[in-house]
Each structure stands twice: as structure tokens, then as C-alpha cells.
Amino acid sequence: MTDLATRARTLLDLHTAPEILVLANVWDVVSAGVVAATDGVRALATASHSIAATFGYEDGENIPLDLHLDMVARIAAAVDLPVSMDMEAGYSDAGETARRAIAAGVVGGNLEDGMRPLDEAVAAVEAVLRAGRDAGIDFVLNARTDAYVRAAEGADRGELVAETIRRGRAFLEAGAPVVFVPRLVDREEIAAVVEGLGRGRLTLISVPGVSLPARELQELGVARVSTGPFTQRAALTALQDATAGMVAGGTLPPGTRPLN
């Protein structure tokens, strides 16, 4: 477990460094290999949405956990970098899912709160961290709150920020090193959440055409920005565009590189 412990410490250090950690999420061995070989990449994170889509499942724990973990294990075995897994909401037993993820070679993970009662969400966070301690590693939990994801249309923005901070602080107090808030994209609201949680505690997802650039997020005090399913969508967009070009009588893009 020494190698896993080293990878876990490396991943934690990347989250606490002054420079923002940029993670392009991966979904299979070939995408992991391409991303890992890219200059500047220091860690990998899987995307549950993308892995599920690879096997024909909808997102939201519809892919069987065994199948999900098998792909994650293949990814972790194929690279020399720390790997974080999107564990969704923990598949009904966050601690056991984390234990199995660690056995698959994972040293960090996302865990959704689903806006469950806060005491239940905190208990799930504690269970994941306990699984890490039992395995002898500092598991890097990216504790996710779905306050923005599940917000009603027209929700009061101030109340939304306040609830995000309330839940995020509870996860930090339970031992999570960072808090993930998907769909948080407004500059002023990001700044408010950073102020409420502390610099280097907030992680975000980059939404094409909407999110701030990584360098600006770093200036605001964000610890990490990832891409979620959008990297797979970028790849599929390129695939569809290349196919359309061929069908229309053209050729494949001349800049196509042999990455596999």
C-alpha cells in the first residue's frame, strides 16, 4: 500500500498547492493514457457520467458498481499518476464503495450529497475518510454538495450561497480537504463561497462557454477545476465533425495525431 499512500499524498499536495489543480476527466484506458501523457498533467480523475455512457448507461448510479470499478481499476493500472474516482453518491454505502475504490488503485474521489439531510451527508463523508485511514492512505475526498445542481429555478442567490457554505463547512469539519460545487460559475458567488470556506478549499467544474478560465479561478482562490463529462463530449464532437466531413466528400482532419 506504500505506492498508494505516496500517490494519495501527492494528490493531496496538489490540492493544497498555490497553483490551481486542473483535471481533465477520463473514462477509459485510452483517454487516460492520452491525458496522462499531456504536458502539465499531474493527476487524473474519472467521470462517472462518461464511464456510464461508454457502456450505454444513464448517469446516476445506473451502471453496476462492479462494472464501474472494473473500468476505474483498468485506468489506475494504466497510468503512473494519482487517480481520483467519481463515486457518485456512494452506491448506498459510501464507506464500502471507497474501500473497493482504494483496492482498485484509487486515492481520491468525489462524493455527492444529493442534498440529503446534512447529518446523513456528513456521516457518508466520515465513512469515506475512515475507509482511507483503514487502508493507510490520506484519501483525498472531494466532498460534493448539490446545492446548485438541485436549486429551484429562480432560487434566491444569497440563500443558495449560504446553504453551499453551510454544507461545505460541515464537510470540511468532518475532514474532507476540499468541497466540490458543480454549476457554481458566477464570479461574485465563487468569491463569496471561497470567503466562506477559505482559500484552497473550493473545487469547480469547467462548463464550456460559461466558466471562468482556470487562471482566473486560481486568482479567486479555487483549489481545483475539472471537466466532468465535457472532455468526452469534446472527443465526441471531434468524432462527429470528422465523420460529417468525410460523409460530405472530404477527408479526415489533417492534424489527426496517432495517440493510440
Image (cartoon, rainbow, N blue to C red):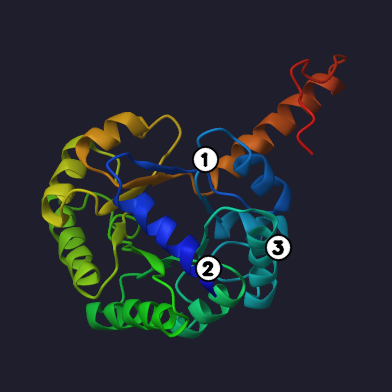
Q: Residue at x 59, y 35 (%)?
A: 38
Q: Badge 3 is on which residue?
A: 74
Q: Residue at x 68, y 38 (%)?
A: 236
Residue shown at the point (67%, 77%) measured from the top left = 66
Q: Residue at x 33, y 76 (%)?
A: 125
Q: The N terminus lies in which quarter of the figure?
A: bottom right
Q: In the rendered view, would you say 260 is above or below 145?
A: above
The answer to which of 40 and 213 lies nearer the viewer is 40
Residue 4, labelled with which disc? 2
Give the Cα distance between marks 1 and 2: 18 Å
Q: Secondary structure at mark 2?
A: helix
Query: Relative to the observer, which residue lies in front, 97 or 115?
Result: 97
* In front of the other: 179 or 167: 179
In the rendered structure, the answer to whether residue 137 lies left or right of residue 24 reads: left
User: How far separated are the C-alphas under marks 2 and 3?
Assistant: 15 Å
Residue 95 percent location from the top left of the image: 44, 83
Using residue 245 as the reference point, say whether residue 48 is left or right of it: left
Task: Give the answer, above or below, for where 23 lies relative to 129.
Answer: above
Residue 92 appears in the figure: yes
Label 2 packing within 10 angstroms: few (<14), some (14-19), many (20+): many
Specify the amino acid type for callout 2: Leu
Q: Amino acid at mark 1?
A: Val
Residue 21 percent location from the top left of the image: 39, 44
Q: Position of residue 186 (x, y in %)?
A: 24, 38
Q: Which residue is mark 1?
A: 41
Estimate how packed mark 1 is, as few (under 14), some (14 to 19) or many (20 or more) residues with alpha carbons within 10 Å.
some
